[in-house]
Amino acid sequence: MSNYTTLINAIIQRTKAFEDDLPIKNNACRSKFFFHPHPTSKVCLFFHGFTAGPYQFEPIGKILFDAGYNVLVPLQPGHGVAGNWDSNNPPPLPTEAKVYQEFALYWLEVTRTLGEQVIVGGLSTGGNLAAWLFLERPQEINKAILFAPYISGTNSLVDFFVEVLPIYFEWLNKDNPGNFGYKGFRVPALRIFLDLGEETLARVKNQPIAPFFAIVAESDRTVERHELKKLFRTTLQHQPKSWYFSFDNFFHIPHTMMTKSEGNQYQDLLITIAKAYIESNITWFELMEIGHQILQGKTFETAVETLNLTQRVCSDLSVMLAVMNKKIIIDNE
């Protein structure tokens, strides 16, 4: 226990010293750690989105901490740095994937020392990085959650623009009060994630992978859901504990789906669905069978008991099934 206490204190102190030297743009961009005074059954490592910061995972981090887990949300390389950034002086974002990959591997090693089962996840390009990590180290990761992962974009013309043009781009929602990150970036800094996404889609066809849960929204015009469905269907053949969920247009959930301040008024619902995956231990096919039983008129509790899954599901799963598109369940019958 004394070694554990020494370790978490060292993580906090080293990270603070490093971020003080940057210096950090504001406290919202600082790494967020939610540590219990002892190792936990599960420990979560989350990667924030492109040009954003760890503030995106503070709401879910607090909920998972309260559920008994350690949670780490480290600031990514080149992000959250104070400065007068613009087209003539763009923020110092990496333009080589290796920088992010070494960062992810380092934090995975740290995370593994703090709990029994490792959960990794990320939003947008952070989800892309989490996907690379569960392909790279599938034996070390229990589960992954990809929140609107930027595996590929929705518009081939925009993808071409990202791949080719070395220009500076400003976000359309740059003045949103919930945005504490950079207002713009040079396109080559984003390009590496499209390349990483292509690599991910190719690798899942023929190598081991940790189970993952892709959470997307139909109202999100940034990511290509067709490619994500293909990724899910491909991995389902050899990783049946992978899940897929898409929020209906009714919810109007934006790409920046992790917080209310960035536009998701259903933040708590999103967290509940993610927690259901973390705390359940069933396959996609078992999930669909529960849904099928409910469509036949059974309550969630009765369906789970009938299928002898009571000890393997989280009660939060009933919420996810209540808002899931019933056509998905019917098509899987």
Image: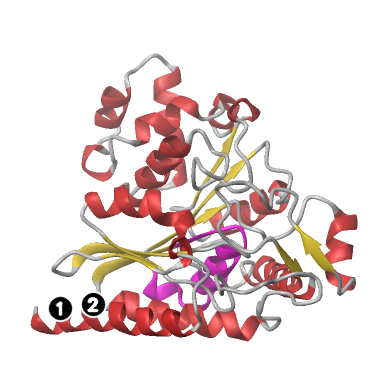
The majority secondary structure of the magenta stretch comes to: helix
Is residue 137 highlighted in magenta? Answer: yes
Query: Could you say where residue 119 lies in the image, as x and y percent from the top left?
Result: 38, 63
Residue 208 is at least partly visible in this image: no
Could you say which is closer to the camera, residue 25 or residue 42?
25
According to the image, what is the colour scheme of the structure?
secondary structure
| Residue holding disc 2 | 8
The amino acid at mark 1 is Thr
Name which residue lies at 36% across and 79% down. Answer: 16
Q: Is 127 within the magenta?
A: yes
Residues at marks 2 and 1, CA–CA distance in whole angstroms: 5 Å
**Left or right: 5, with 300 as reference point:** left
x, y percent for residue 18: 42, 84
SS at mark 2?
Answer: helix
Residue 28, image x and y in percent? 45, 60
Above or below: residue 47 compared with residue 264: below
Residue at 50% x, 48% y is 258
Q: Amino acid at mark 2?
A: Ile
Q: How would you rate the neighbour count of disc 1 (Cα within 10 Å): few for under 14, some for 14-19, many for 20 or more? A: some
Which corner quadrant holds the N terminus? bottom left
Mark drawn on residue 5: 1
Which residue shows up at 62% across the image and 32% down it?
Answer: 252
Q: Are marks 2 and 1 in contact (CB under 8 Å)?
A: yes
Q: Which residues are magenta?
A: 121-141
Residue at image coords 43%, 68%: 30
Question: Is residue 65 something that shows in the picture?
Answer: yes
Per the image, label 1 sits on a secondary structure element best described as helix
Q: Is residue 209 above or below residue 312?
A: below
